[in-house]
Image (cartoon, helix red, strand yellow):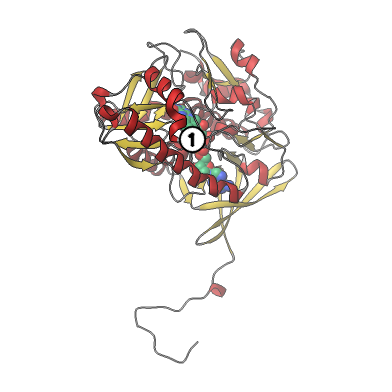
Amino acid sequence: MLDRPFSPDTQIVSRKQQPPVLERGCDICVIGSGASGISAAVEAARAGRSVILVDGLPSLGGQAVNSIIGMFCGLYTPGKEGRQLTHGIADEIIRDLGATDDVKVVAGGVMKVAMYNEVALGRWVEKAVSAAGVTPLTGALIRGVNQQGRRITSLDVATRHGDVRITATGFIDATGDAAVAWEGGYDCQIHKGGQIYGSQMLVIEDFDDSKKPSWDEMATRIREKGGKYGMMRRDGFAASFPGRNVAIVNMTHIETPLDPFDAAAKQIDGKEQADRTLNFLHAEFPEAFGRARIRAYGLPGIRQTRWIVGTHHLTTAEVRAGTRFDDAIARCSWPLEQHHNREGYVWEVFPDDHIHWIPLGSLTVAGADNLCAVGRCIDADSSALSSVRVMGPCIAMGRAAAHALDLAGSGSVHAIDIKALQARLKDNLEF
Ligand SMILES: Cc1cc2nc3c(=O)[nH]c(=O)nc-3n(C[C@H](O)[C@H](O)[C@H](O)COP(=O)(O)OP(=O)(O)OC[C@H]3O[C@@H](n4cnc5c(N)ncnc54)[C@H](O)[C@@H]3O)c2cc1C
């Protein structure tokens, strides 16, 4: 201790007095707080489990909030009269945010979607997590996964306030990048020879909605003139939130590499592309967008990077055929929506009566008894994943994983009573 005076309202502390690792235990640890992770955490807590919800970002909500995705897709069957496929927290979001006009269910061109205000959704998520008694741990990145045989016993995470070890009976990988499976050394999949592009989302304000071009007109103009403005992607849309003078703009394609330096560089590249998009809108549609300004850039929108090897690989053929698996836990009708070329995306819309199914086997990590993946990192081929990763089915998968691990307890998620699980998920499986 220095021989000098200190202010009476300070206390001298040093690292040596702190335990090197803070340990906490829970029944179910969910890593990742996007649409799938929030659903998983809230459902597990409501099933009576103690839950810790970990996220690397300093706030909750994943891409739904922080990348400003702006609309829940995949909640309804095709057609303007679409029927709701997923319930659980989806019902509560529509009810609570609908009451303040922060959600609007709109019949889009081919599908009904629920548009939302991302600021209101962010607060809804925080309140839902608190009300359910979930313990959040934000700003916490996975540093290690500890195992005994086929079970994960604990997770080591690093926070700005020190290292934490979380022990749990079950773990849910809702990281989108299969980060838990990867750190645990389980086999994972990556795309071979090419990119699945992400997008830099934008919120714009101060435009004239009544003069906005149609989606087709916009798409044609981007195709014809986008190159002049340096736009890489040559399609996209600006979707206005009904009754508010704001729109979400989805017109960029950005690479989303797993190399940390490349990822940081591409984040800036995404914003440059977004600025070019605004130049295009200003110049090509001056009546509608001449005064438009960017109100917010989302965090990089990441569609697909690395995903698990489950016990079932969901294929495009199964999606097209609407194969109903014995262990079906969620359903979806969203089109195949592949973003694997720079210029645009490939869109395959299904007929009005089409439904496809997600099996539990695509969520259960091969080789692990107490780990499920949910959301955009489940086991599927890239085209099948392009449909089932939208947020409606993400919510359904989160719910399914929570109940699967609840049923498994200290046993294996590979050996649960599927009928008992499906009974708990009934309204997500039947009308
Ligand atoms: C540009 C774009 C537009 C899209 N448009 C739509 C749309 O209109 N409607 C729709 O329904 N879907 C849309 N999608 C798809 C959908 O948004 C995503 O697939 C979905 O949000 C993924 O949710 P998730 O819960 O799987 O993961 P995410 O929302 O990606 O959440 C993963 C969370 O895990 C955390 N995490 C990751 N790694 C770690 C780690 N190592 N340690 C700790 N935390 C970690 C992250 O910080 C993040 O918060 C779009 C996707 C993109 C990229």
Q: Which residue is painted at 39% across and 17% down in the image?
A: 216
Quarter of the image with the C terminus is: top left
Tally the numbered discs.
Answer: 1
Is disc 1 surrounded by few (<14), some (14 to 19) or many (20+) residues within 10 Å? many
Q: Quadrant of residue 338?
A: top right
Above/below status of 81 relative to 382: above
Q: Is residue 391 visible?
A: no
In x, y percent, where is residue 204?
32, 36
Comparing 376 with 21, the one in front is 376
Give how far across and how far down residue 351 sits, in percent. 50, 8
Lateral position of residue 71 relative to residue 428, left or right: left
Q: On the picture, is 377 further left or further right than 35?
A: right
Q: Amino acid at mark 1?
A: Ser
**Residue located at (47% from left, 33% from top):** 231
Q: In this orientation, does residue 217 appear?
A: yes
Q: Position of residue 101 (x, y in %)?
A: 26, 29
Q: Position of residue 219 (x, y in %)?
A: 42, 21
Residue at the bottom extreme, as displayed: 3
For the view shown, which residue lies furthest in the right direction? 149
Which residue, given by chain and number where applicable, does mark 1 sit on?
Answer: 199
Residue drawn at x 29%, y 31% as measured from the top left? 289
Q: What residue is shown at x 56% (from left), y 46% (from top)?
A: 263
Image quadrant in which you'd find residue 336: top right
Question: In this rendering, is residue 179 above or below 211?
Answer: below
Seen from the viewer's position, the closer of residues 211 and 369 is: 211
Q: Quick one: SS at disc 1? A: loop
Residue 421's quadrant in the figure? Answer: top right
Above or below residue 333? Residue 123 is below
Does mark 1 have its CB less than 8 Å from ligand 1?
Answer: yes
Q: Nearer the viewer, residue 383 or 86?
A: 383
